[in-house]
Image (tube, rainbow, N blue to C red):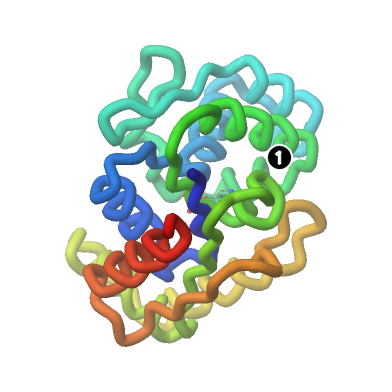
Amino acid sequence: MIITLDGPAGAGKSSTARALARRLGWFYMDTGAMYRAATLVALERQVPLDDSAALAALAESLSIVFRDDRVFVGDRDVSGEIRTERITAATRRVADAAPVRDVMKRMQRRLAEGLDVVTEGRDQGSVVFPQAELKVFLTASAEERALRRHREEAARGVATSLEAILDAQNRRDEGDRVREVGAMRAADDAVVVDTGGLTPDEVVERLAQLVEERRA
Ligand code: DC
């Protein structure tokens, strides 16, 4: 069975997907990490970020694997390195390239083959797994998402204003919406879950219920 979890940054997608997969004992596929890993290698090899054919060829050549909640390129654990601000910024450009998205789509389908999967990203229900048994679109208000990010940054000892976070988030949201390929949107048959006012546990509980309903 395949469960797709899409939605904007800050809606709690990653933590929800990871917790749900753990609870079900299923494979968790973090597709954002795949775009990030390809970007890390592209920067290291100095592939120009506006050369979509070269980026796609590079992505195609990589063996991206998930093991024990970590992401590897070949044997190299890149889980930490892909989370820096530099990679986050560059990944947006790589993820905008249609040929790269095509490569990733095929890689994601291959990784999921024959498995029970919780997959998380922007286009998993709408593009990559249109046949998924359960599609969820997680949202929360812009303020709620910014607040969550603000708390996370504070916990990491980073001092940023809520306004700055909200501003940057609005710009990112707009970019995600208007992108020509892979634009973020809920699949027509997705269940929209607003995580506003819910604790992380409550969100996972709600999704687990949906899974039960679909299986019945
Ligand atoms: O979810 P994240 O922040 O790790 O995603 C990293 C980047 O990749 C972000 O710019 C959105 C993009 N992305 C995408 O375009 N499609 C996906 N399926 C997953 C992520």
- Which secondary structure, mark 1? helix
Q: Residue at x 64, y 54 (%)?
A: 123
Q: Residue at x 31, y 86 (%)?
A: 197
Residue bearing the label numbered 1: 101
Quadrant for the C terminus in the image? bottom left
The answer to whether residue 176 shows anywhere in this view is no
Which residue lies most toward the front here? 216
Residue 174 image offset from top left, x and y in percent: 67, 72
The answer to whether the residue bearing label 1 lies less than 8 angstroms from the nearest atom of ligand 1 is: yes
Q: Along the horizontal axis of the image, is 209 left or right of 119?
A: left
In the depicted structure, whether residue 155 falls above or below residue 38: below
Q: Along the horizontal axis of the image, is 123 left or right of 26?
A: right
The answer to whether residue 79 shows anywhere in this view is yes
Residue 28 image offset from top left, x and y in percent: 39, 41
- Residue type at mark 1: give it: Arg
Q: Categorize mark 1 by other alpha carbons within 10 Å: few (<14), some (14-19), many (20+).
A: many
Pick the residue in front: 56 or 4: 4
Residue 182 image offset from top left, x and y in percent: 72, 53
Q: Quadrant of residue 67?
A: top left
